[in-house]
Amino acid sequence: MTGAARSSERGAAHARVSLAGMLVWGLIALGVLVMAVPLAMTAYISLFRDAVVIFPPSGYATSWYARILEFPRFGEALGTSLRISALATLGSLAVGIPASLALVRYNFVGRGVLNVLLLSPLTVPGVVIGLSIYVLVVETEIATEVPLIGSDLVLVVAHLLITVPWVIRLCVANLVGLDRSVEEAAANLGARPLTVLWRVTLPMMRQGIVAATLFAFIVSFENIEMTLFLIAPGQTTLPISVLQYLEYRVDPLVAAVVMTQTLVIAGLLLLLDRYVKLSRIVS
Amino acid sequence: MSQARGLTAGLLIGPATMIVLGALVAPLALLARYSLNRYDRTNFMIEAFTPENYLRFLYDPFYTGVLWTTLWIALLTTALCLLLGFPIAYRLARSQSRWKSAGVLLVILPLFIGSTVRALGWMGMLGRGGLVDSAVAAASPGSSFPLLYTPFAVVLGILSINLPYMVLTLQSVIEGIDARVEEAADSLGADPSRRFLHVVLPLALPGLATGSVLVFILAMNAYATPLLLGGARFQMMAPMLFREYAVNNNWPFAAAIAFILMVTTLTLTAASSAFVQRRYKAA
């Protein structure tokens, strides 16, 4: 083979590679756009001055953010959302952390089955969970004549069902990675089991617990599919009131509402990221 | 001693188990019973033991059509998530830049932001009088180009919500692949496409399967996106189930839809996991 032929062959290979490289960069750009465009668009609309969305807008203003609280439907819904999510988060930690300790630190009959059972709510569609809890609540109401639909109790229990698996999943992953010998050393030095739990195990689980708290709160706060079946008039969560509003109109007000919510959540996450590496938690 | 430990484990895991049994297993059992009841216009529901709700779904082309639409939307968005997610995940995983953690964080943030935020952005982008429509009208007066309320809008909406999940799953898997394996392939003369097909792809296959199952389930159960971006004529399973429950008050049929949706999703995900596991063992 002559040198010229070889170099032209290499040139062809090089051109093929850079074509493939361009294709890959094109795919990357497309993927980033698909993720970023809707968020950027919502942020943009929230700054329109007029109440209608037309392009180009007649002017820009931040006044919609200040006016959010004038609309009680969003204020009340936010209150309900925060109340339900806070209760569900606390409850899921109280129930989920002991369960993960049992799953990792104890050996008992049926552990494998319970492990699958406790994580199973994550694989059942939200609308199916919502409808099934609703029919059970209706049957219970008929049997006991206690009004339950739309009550905090039902909403919190339902939200526990979807938050507990996350707490267990994150705490189990955290516990598996912990060095057991520290706990054993404490026990050998005479610490009683509860002292070991309180002074050694729980502090070592800090990262997992923080991650679980965050996940539980957000999973509960953002839930639409299940909650949809369990709300009552006057007892609506924020994402559902936004959804119902969007079915009829899109305007800068509702964009400002969701942007506020987004910014608060992003702020919490950034704050959290300084203490625990989020990327390690999620994947 | 071991009995005491068993008791402790039972106390630790008991509450979580009670929640899953009480809020998932019992309601699903009741819903299964409901799905065999008969609907009646005046009494709403009559006790019965009939498969007619399931047969009605399976023999009515409208309902099977909705199931097919849901399936192809879910499969298409899963494929697009793989196509767009892999290059981003690969770049992020192999990046040495100090912007890497910022990039990972930018992919994580959307996970915590509700689907309504993304839907709102796409509505402003694609709707009548939206950005695209206005741009087209400005370019050629009199013409309009509303993309909202089309399957395209729904695919785009679901894609923008599910893509971050895929990117994160793939990124953690690719991080786990030793970069030296790729360098070895490189120095043995494999060009980038061969290196990708014969080295990276087989090693990343379990991650591709995990990510695909995750985004497939999310797409099958999507509620807000098809409702807001698909419009009244476009039907997917989750919104249809809610309508049967809320508008038509046909609980037995809604229950049957719930089980058809759940069984379809679980069957397909189990089948794909089994398929990948066999391929993986053979390879």
Image (tube, helix red, strand yellow):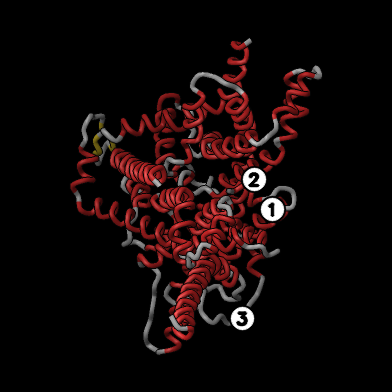
Residue B179 in view: yes
Question: Dot 2 falls on which chain?
Answer: A
Sooner in the amino-acid sequence: mark 1 or mark 2: 2
Q: Nearer the viewer, mark 1 or mark 3?
A: 1
Q: Could you tell me if the residues under marks 1 and 2 are in contact, i.e. CB atoms within 8 Å?
A: yes
Question: Relative to A222, does residue B5 appear above or below in the rendering?
Answer: above
User: Disc 3 versus disc 2: distance between alpha carbons?
Assistant: 38 Å
- Chain label for disc 3: A
Q: Nearer the viewer, mark 3 or mark 2?
A: 2
Q: Which residue is mark 2?
A: A214
Amino acid type indicated by mark 3: Gly
In the image, is B158 to the left or to the right of A258? left
Are both tags, 1 and 2, on one chain? yes
Horizontal and vertical percent position of residue A48: 59, 75
User: In which image quadrant can residue A56 be found?
Assistant: bottom right
Of the image marks 3 and 2, the number of the one nearer the N terminus? 3
Q: Distance between the Cα atoms at labels 1 and 3?
A: 31 Å
Locate residue B126: give its quadrant.
bottom left
Q: Amino acid at mark 2?
A: Leu
**Which mark is drawn over residue A268?**
1
For marks 1 and 3, the one nearer the N-term is 3
Query: What residue sits right under mark 3 in the picture?
Result: A59
- Badge 2 density bin: few <14, some 14–19, many ≥20, Cα 10 Å: some
Where B19 falls versus A236 (above or below)?
above
Element type at mark 2:
helix
- Give me the residue at 57% from left, 27% from top: A103
- Label 3 secondary element: loop
| Label 3–label 2 contact, CB within 8 A | no
